[in-house]
Amino acid sequence: MSAQCSIAGGLFALLICVTSVVAADRIALLPFADPNSTELGKVMFEQFAREQLVKRGFEVIGADSLGNVLRNLRVRNTATPIESEVHAIGDSLNAQFILTGTIHSFTLDSTFSEVSVCARLLRAGDSKIVWDNCVSLSGSGEEALISKPVHDSYRKMAKSATKKLFATLRLKARPQRTFVSDLMVAGREKKELIACSPIAVIPPVDESEVAFAGEMVGNFLVTSLVRRGFNVIDPGRVRNVMLQCEDLRHGQSVNTVSKMLADSLGVTLVVTGTISKLTEARSAMLGSSPEAAIELRMIDPRRNIVVWASHVERSGDSRKGLFETGVVHSPAVLALDMIEDAVDGLRVVRRKFDQPLN
């Protein structure tokens, strides 16, 4: 792997590395996590992910060797391994990269099919996110009420989703020339620029009826922010801090966790929120669609204030056209579209790598 690094000076120092992946890089493909415990899906997605990586010229470490290391290190959470686990896996297997994946939904029946999967490539040496992507597909009813199912088997659906998932992973990445350095917000008298590098994502509080929606939307947020050009801290490093403060499920406030993220990881902004509504998948045959309501906010942990907030509410038929075209019957597809729209709506300042920040 080659890297070109430059230091941007000013109010704070930010080390930005532009990476390009070359053949012969060794990748540890961790077992895909599946909160819904679908063993069949885990096997399929790992198989197709391995095929996609090999096609791109990567050397994927054997499953047996990886399994022995994971057992010896007692790594149980393969979706968001903490920083020390990433380093240990890399050192034990002489791997330059660690690939993690999560299957958020994998459903197939006669009237509706849905798949939602996310993957993230980490640099083993420093847990830096090199590549990140999420894909949500609906196998039927996506285009119109009378449309026929696109996929008629789990295998076809998994293969299609995995191919689309890795479509953005290039053997040689184009050099990234700019990064998001500041968030532009409306102040009382004038617009204010707020430093936003690096930022961390805390999975939103989940009040929906969809199982594990908080983890899913949290991954959607990371992917959308990385795609937009934000410097996002790896979720495994965030999880490690949350474990140290007993995480939000054991009485810790978001402000407390945010302050610890700022102190330990240098985070300038924390993104979180609440999923107040996300209904289950709806059958195209019945003509119904899911509904979602998500509140997002960005917190400045140093000043303990909310610098940006957005409430997004939408139903699957909100973009309905003639003959039901545009109707979304998948809650995962609906949620991903909403997150991408919200992130795209952020007003930001982009700077070149060698441009001073003062």
Image (spheres, rainbow, N blue to C red):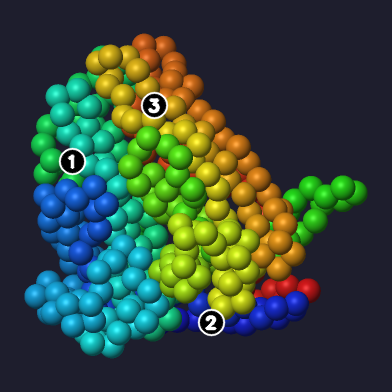
**Percent position (x, y) of residue 339?**
50, 43
Q: Which residue is mark 2?
A: 5
**Which label sits on residue 109?**
none
Q: Secondary structure at mark 2?
A: strand
Q: Is residue 267 left or right of residue 1?
A: right
Q: Which label is found at residue 157?
A: 1
**Residue 45 percent across, percent down from the top left:** 18, 54
Residue 289, picture quadrant? top left
Closer-to-camera residue (327/351)? 327
Task: Give amino acid for label 3.
Answer: Pro
Quarter of the image for the N terminus: give it: bottom left
The tag earlier along the polypeptide, 1 or 2, is 2
Q: Is residue 111 above or below residue 187?
A: above
Residue drawn at (13%, 79%) of the image = 68
Distance from disc 1 to disc 3, alpha carbons, whole Å, reads 21 Å
Note whether 284 is above or below 27 in the view shown.
above
